[in-house]
């Protein structure tokens, strides 16, 4: 399978999860403003780290980010990949 297809399909699979991580990360910036209760902060942190699903589920997303980034860099420098 070509790098372009791998990049395309892995991006499609991981995109919803990346959106959740970025949205919860943005919400965590409100942590020090007093706009969120402690329970809300805990929920957002658990969603952000994926500990609400499984203890180390976030590791899968880390590998997803690395894979999509590496294949994107390969495509940037090798237009025929």
Image (cartoon, rainbow, N blue to C red):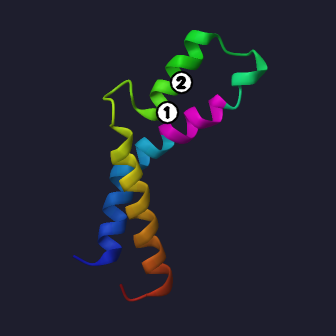
Quarter of the image with the C terminus in it: bottom left
Residue plotted at (57% across, 14% down): 40
- Residue drawn at point x = 33 percent, y = 37 percent: 57
Residue under numbered circle 2: 44
In-front residue for pair 44/78? 44
Crowd class of label 1 (few under 14; some 14 to 19; many from 20; radius 10 Å): many
Indicate the quadrant where residue 71 lies: bottom left
**What are the residue bounds of the magenta stretch?**
20-28
Q: In the image, residue 27 lies at what x, y percent?
A: 64, 29
Magenta span dominant secondary structure: helix
**Direction from residue 54 to residue 79 in the image, left or right:** right
Residue placed under numbered mark 1 in the picture: 48
Residue that extends furthest to the left in the rendered view of this protein: 1
Which x, y percent locates residue 77?
49, 85
Please tell me whether mark 2 sits on a helix, a strand or a loop.
Answer: helix
Does the magenta segment cover residue 51? no
Is residue 76 positioned above or below 62 on the image?
below
Could you tell me if the residues under marks 2 and 1 are in contact, i.e. CB atoms within 8 Å? yes
* Figure check: 26 above or below 64: above
In the rendered image, the quadrant that contains the N terminus is: bottom left
């Amino acid at each position: 399978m070509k790098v372009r297809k791998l990049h395309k399909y892995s991006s499609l699979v991981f995109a919803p999860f990346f959106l959740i991580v970025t949205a919860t990360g943005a919400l965590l910036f409100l942590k020090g403003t007093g706009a969120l209760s402690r329970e809300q902060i805990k929920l957002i942190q658990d969603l952000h780290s994926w500990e609400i699903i499984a203890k180390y589920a976030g590791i899968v997303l880390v590998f997803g980010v690395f894979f999509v980034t590496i294949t994107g860099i390969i495509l940037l420098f090798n237009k025929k990949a």
